[in-house]
Amino acid sequence: MNIDFPPPSNGIYNNAGSSRQLVNYMEHEDMERITEGVFVEGFFNFSNDDVPKVEVIQQIDNNIRQLMKTDAKFYAIHVSPSEKELAIMGRTEKEQSDAMKQYIREIFIPAYAQNFNKDLNANDIKFFGKIHFNRDRSENKLNMHCHLIVSRKDQSNKKKLSPLTNHRNTKKGAIKGGFDRKTLFQQAEAGFDKLFGYQRELQETFVYCNTMKNGKIEDKMQMQERELKTTKNPLFKEIAPNETPQNQKNSIGTYEHTNIPTFEQPNDQPFNHTNDQNNSSSLFSILPSAADTNSNADDEQHMRKPKKKKKRRRGIT
């Protein structure tokens, strides 16, 4: 699951003024689908699957009490499942879009609210979503994804909420609460897996991708060892804490907001690594060396040459 927050800009994602430009963009593929006779998804929120565009703009633009002219008024979020994740969400575009709306309502928005650390719940978030099916920008055969526009202020128009802040659960100072994006990504991933009964491989997890991109060298090595263990033994599967095959769902069902997985580990220590120093060096004995890899072709050529028959030595009879 790929989740990103496009940074504010002077173009479509300019969030200092009206939301009209972004909302218009979110409708950009509708006319083409209507022309082709394919169904179109409207804007949705918690209670409505077909919110008029005018209402979306009005609700976002009017929820800006005490915000300065140059302050952000809203934020954009992209939620894009992989092909494998889409396959388990449904067989048709309609099934997949319905599953995506359920996921946004029951998993993503509750986790989004929780990570502001301001005692918010899902109903405090003012948001609107739009499902896109466009495949032009991706090599994936399946490219259904969701665009979200989320108000800077909560439903009461009193609390400021910024998912782009670098503060995390702060107690003192002008900014209290903050936002924890790493925990959000983990909760959104774990919630998806539980909701749809998805068996996620190690290489698909956020902690794996984050470690291989941003982790320390020793963490990367230990992660590669875990990867090799699962690759060499297909029967081996790591089960997350408190997760058993019995409590995984095989079909879409109701997911309580209070059941969102929580992650109490520090952000800079995503794994419970062992202190065995031998683990850090064993990786090199498992992986083939560059010399071994380059010699494979030569070895095959030698194997194909027929063996020469030994000449019989003449002796004295």
Image (spheres, rainbow, N blue to C red):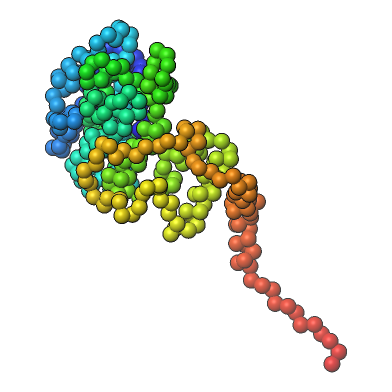
Q: Is residue 156 above or below residue 255?
A: above
- How far from the left and from the top, in percent, is residue 241? 40, 47
Residue at the top extreme, as displayed: 69
Number of numbered callouts drawn: 0
Q: Is residue 132 left or right of residue 293?
A: left
Q: Is residue 233 visible?
A: yes
- How far from the left and from the top, in percent, is residue 228? 52, 52
Residue for point 34% across, 20% down: 162
Residue at the right extreme, as displayed: 316
Q: Is residue 32 left or right of residue 305?
A: left
- How far from the left and from the top, in percent, is residue 192? 31, 42
Closest to the observer, 238 or 291: 238
Q: Is residue 293 visible?
A: no
- How far from the left and from the top, in percent, is residue 170? 42, 21
Residue for point 41% across, 20% down: 171
Quadrant location of the N terminus in the rendered image: top left
Q: Is residue 274 above or below residue 295?
A: above
Residue for point 22% across, 27% down: 123
Examine the image and state in which quarter residue 70 appears. Answer: top left
Closest to the observer, 310 or 79: 79
